[in-house]
Image (spheres, coloured by chain):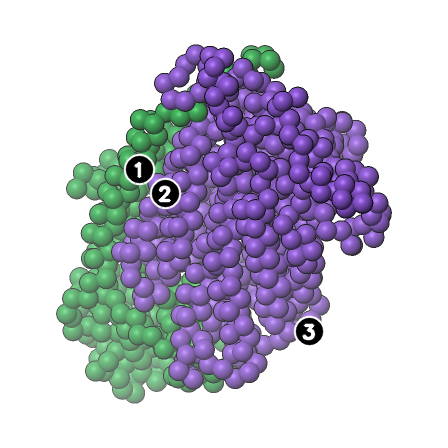
Chain colours: A purple, B green
């Protein structure tokens, strides 16, 4: 047992009267537990469930949009309702699903366990984050029940379309309020994750022994802290313009409408990576575990993440090339350069699989699906970093196709994360057969959905149009895309079916995947404060090192198993 | 330029009807060749890994190699070189597009909810129309045409597919660019930036004619004829969804 540490938390708990010791936790049960908990695992689960419900709601909006576009004259919904639909589809998916799912859900559950912490640094703040998020989500969606309908100015709310003259009504105000609340929830989670990762790591867990997922969450949290306050300020100014007679974004009073775009995208582009980095982290862990190898180029991966984050703060105006009021070459080269660290990540993922022993579980299939879909989204993103090509495709379906390739890749990675970490969270494995059918539907659906949209964009179909009567031959490509959207919808339903079918059926055990990081050292689900004992942490794969002491990571050029004395030197 | 040959596929884009649209098209081809080569290479690597390294038994443990510094350097440095190549090509085309050579033909384009107004400074010619009435901007072929683009209310997008080009019409900002059409014809244009209820129907057309026809058209439509043209456009607009009339001032959105 020299390899096992007693975690300091246990010592602390004994002085605490045993109230929090082990799983002898005497808190409330049932619904009261969910309402009053400060346990990061239960808060994380609340986040995950809520955000998956948001995914379904946003998905229903998406299917309605596709149905409307199935005819050139689109008679399913009115022009006004269509504007509400795509506004709320984008808002729900970006603000209420993708971010909260990643940094409120999976990261909340996994990061403390991955670094050997008993909980988040500020458990009550963590609970506040969740309740702010839920309140914000309900506030934003409540717009549908107002007389004027929900917000209808696009998820980017460009001024002056979003002012009180052009978008009167409570729906827009509820959108602003809901976004403010979820924004604060994100900021508090960012504070919490940063503090947890800096201060609550187990003995031996140095920065360069943190798993890539934790690293990515740290960088994400820092980006949240840099970007979200800017959005919050922008939203408050927008609200003041709407109700208190300020003229920050209106020409009439000497304001500047484009200022909103600068503020929005100064948040909005880091936000792209706030959304993406957690999913990159999930995929990285999964590639390593199911290839039974360490993450290839571990340190390069971390530097790539840091450079993506740094560059992402200087590229916001590539969303504004066609405004004619930004410095094109600067934002172009900064945006193009993001391709470099992103490319490093892609090659590292393939390097991780190279010469591995690949186990094609559902999680691994989803992660490979993520890689292919993200490659497509990434390559088409390079076009958009070039101003002349952006002038050509801006606000057409080419852009829609580009970012839907990216977000469908994130959905694939998120599903991979659920299949991979689900057993740790619940103690039960999801049905692999249903999972694989879900994978093929989701993967093929994603490509069938996005590919026609690229062509539609090149054919000149603009975004956010409810009808296309002047060019009815766009119908065919729209219909193909809708088939893809239906496949994606079915795959999401299959996931829900899988959760129901697999409910408490296939016990997982502590480490069903022979995984590598610390969360797989404890029980599934983990006890109240996560660990009874910890292994020696000598690399970024403490559980693997403990289970396979003869198969530690090899440095470059090292081909044989390390000698006995080499092993003893490591980390002692 | 090697990429401008007919042998390179068009990757879904078209050369278009202006000088810059052709440059953009060639840039598109260049980027696409790069994307296909790099994307294809990555897909082949992935396909090989997936087929070759399928596990043989659940107990097999591969060599735990983690770093290969020379390899990592290669796939850091090569993409940087590629990126600078793409950036150089971008600059060449971009400088052509943002250049504003001197010209005598000027059109003031004003976008509003939900229509377009094309006025020809120095003459009294004004073409204005709402939604699917599709007001027509007439310009001469093989001539630099300077466009002054403004918006009366919210942000609109001036987009002509055949020109491979779009630009925002912003309230309070004068956006300027130059078009040089290379073939006559009528081209469809549409607002691309969400601008409210009738965004989908905010159409216009660009009619490229010979310089002689252009002069004749300008003469015929100036002064009293201008109001007739406006009236004609308005009449055509009545066949389309009824657009609530809104007082628009030239001073912006409030």
- Residue that badge 3 annotates: A147
Residue at mark 3 to residue at mark 2: CA–CA distance: 46 Å
Quadrant in the picture for residue A425: top right
- Residue at the image point whose x is 43% and y is 49% from the top: A309
- Mark 1 vs mark 3: give the one in front: 1
- Residue at the image point whose x is 58% and y is 77% from the top: A168
Chain to which mark 1 belongs: B
Q: Is residue A387 above or below residue B176?
A: above
Instruction: Give the x, y percent position of residue A251.
Output: 41, 80
Chain to which mark 3 belongs: A
- Residue at the image point whose x is 62% and y is 68% from the top: A177
- Dot 1 alpha-carbon crowd within 10 angstroms: few under 14, some 14 to 19, many 20 or more: some
Residue at mark 2 to residue at mark 1: CA–CA distance: 8 Å
- Is residue A499 visible in the rendered image? The answer is no
Q: Secondary structure at mark 1?
A: helix
Instruction: Give the x, y percent position of residue A479.
Output: 55, 46
Residue at mark 1 to residue at mark 3: CA–CA distance: 53 Å
Residue A339 image label: 2
Taking the view exactly as shown, the residue that stands out farthest to the front is: A15
Instruction: Give the x, y percent position of residue B52.
Output: 47, 16
Q: Are marks 2 and 1 on the same chain?
A: no
Q: Are marks 2 and 1 in contact (CB under 8 Å)?
A: yes
- Residue that badge 1 annotates: B79
């Amino acid at each position: 047992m020299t390899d096992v540490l007693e975690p300091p938390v246990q010592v602390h708990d004994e002085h605490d009267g045993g109230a929090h010791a082990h799983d002898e936790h005497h808190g409330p049960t049932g619904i009261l537990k969910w309402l009053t908990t400060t346990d990061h695992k239960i808060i994380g689960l609340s986040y995950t469930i809520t955000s998956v419900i948001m995914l379904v709601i946003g998905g229903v909006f998406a299917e309605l949009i596709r149905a409307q576009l199935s005819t050139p004259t689109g008679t399913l919904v009115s022009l006004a309702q269509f504007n509400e639909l795509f506004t709320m589809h984008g808002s729900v998916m970006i603000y209420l699903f993708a971010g909260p799912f990643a940094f409120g859900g999976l990261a909340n559950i996994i990061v403390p366990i991955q670094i050997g912490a008993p909980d988040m640094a500020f458990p009550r703040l963590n609970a506040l984050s969740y309740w702010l998020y839920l309140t914000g989500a309900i506030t934003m969606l409540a717009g549908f029940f107002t007389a004027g309908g929900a917000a209808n100015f696009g998820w980017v709310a460009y001024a002056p379309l979003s002012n009180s003259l052009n978008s009167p009504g409570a729906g827009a105000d509820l959108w602003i309020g809901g976004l403010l609340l979820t924004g604060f929830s994100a900021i508090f989670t960012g504070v919490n994750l940063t503090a947890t990762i800096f201060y609550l790591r187990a003995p031996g867990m140095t920065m360069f022994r943190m798993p890539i997922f934790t690293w990515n969450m740290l960088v994400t949290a820092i980006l949240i802290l840099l970007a979200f306050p800017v959005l919050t300020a922008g939203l408050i100014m927008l609200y003041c313009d709407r109700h208190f007679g300020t003229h920050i974004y209106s020409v009439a009073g000497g304001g500047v409408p484009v200022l909103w775009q600068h503020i929005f995208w100064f948040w909005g582009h880091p936000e792209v990576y706030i959304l993406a980095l957690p999913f990159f982290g999930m995929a990285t862990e999964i590639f390593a575990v199911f290839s039974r190898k360490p993450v290839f180029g571990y340190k390069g991966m971390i530097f790539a993440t840091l450079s993506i984050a740094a560059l992402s703060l200087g590229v916001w105006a590539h969303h504004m090339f066609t405004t004619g009021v930004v410095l094109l070459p600067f934002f172009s080269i900064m945006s193009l350069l993001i391709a470099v660290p992103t490319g490093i990540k892609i090659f590292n993922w393939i390097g991780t699989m190279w010469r591995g022993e690949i186990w094609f579980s559902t999680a691994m299939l989803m992660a490979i699906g993520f890689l292919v879909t993200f490659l497509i989204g990434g390559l088409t993103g390079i076009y958009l970093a070039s101003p002349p090509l952006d002038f050509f495709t801006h606000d057409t379906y080419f852009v829609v196709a580009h970012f839907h390739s990216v977000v469908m890749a994130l959905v694939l990675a998120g599903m991979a994360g659920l299949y991979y970490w689900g057993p740790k969270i619940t103690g039960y494995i999801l049905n692999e057969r249903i999972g694989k059918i879900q994978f093929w539907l989701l993967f093929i659906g994603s490509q069938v959905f996005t590919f026609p949209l690229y062509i539609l964009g090149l054919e000149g179909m603009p975004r956010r149009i409810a009808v296309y009567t002047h060019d009815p031959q766009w119908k065919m490509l729209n219909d193909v895309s809708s088939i893809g959207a239906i496949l994606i919808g079915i795959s999401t339903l299959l996931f829900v079916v899988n959760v129901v079918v697999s409910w408490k059926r296939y016990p997982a055990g502590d480490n069903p995947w022979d995984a590598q990081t610390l969360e797989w050292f404890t029980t599934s689900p983990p006890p109240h404060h996560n660990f009874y004992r910890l292994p020696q942490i000598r690399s970024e794969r403490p559980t693997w090192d403990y289970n396979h002491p003869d198969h530690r990571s090899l440095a470059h050029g090292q081909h044989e198993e390390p000698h006995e004395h080499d092993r003893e030197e490591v980390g002692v | 330029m090697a990429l401008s040959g007919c042998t390179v596929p068009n990757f879904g884009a078209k050369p278009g009807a202006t000088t810059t649209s052709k440059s953009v098209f060639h840039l598109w081809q260049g980027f696409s060749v790069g994307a296909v080569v790099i994307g294809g290479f990555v897909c082949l690597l992935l396909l090989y890994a997936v087929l070759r390294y399928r596990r043989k038994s659940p107990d097999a443990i591969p060599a735990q190699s983690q770093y290969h510094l020379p390899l990592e350097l290669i796939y850091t440095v090569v993409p940087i070189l590629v990126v600078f190549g793409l950036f150089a090509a971008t600059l060449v085309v971009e400088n052509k597009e943002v250049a504003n050579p001197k010209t005598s033909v000027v059109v003031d384009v004003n976008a509003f909810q939900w229509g377009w107004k094309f006025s020809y400074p120095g003459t009294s010619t004004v073409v204005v129309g709402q939604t699917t009435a599709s007001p027509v901007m007439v310009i001469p072929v093989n001539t630099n045409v300077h466009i002054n683009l403004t918006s009366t209310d919210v942000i609109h997008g001036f987009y002509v597919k055949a020109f491979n080009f779009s630009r925002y019409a912003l309230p309070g900002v004068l956006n300027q660019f130059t078009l040089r059409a290379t073939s006559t014809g009528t081209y469809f244009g549409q607002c691309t930036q969400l601008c409210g209820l009738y965004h989908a129907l905010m159409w216009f057309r660009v009619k490229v004619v010979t310089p002689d026809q252009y002069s004749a058209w300008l003469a015929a439509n100036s002064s009293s004829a201008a109001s007739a043209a406006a009236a004609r456009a308005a009449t055509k607009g009545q066949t389309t969804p009824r657009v609530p009339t809104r007082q628009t001032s030239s001073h912006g959105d409030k």
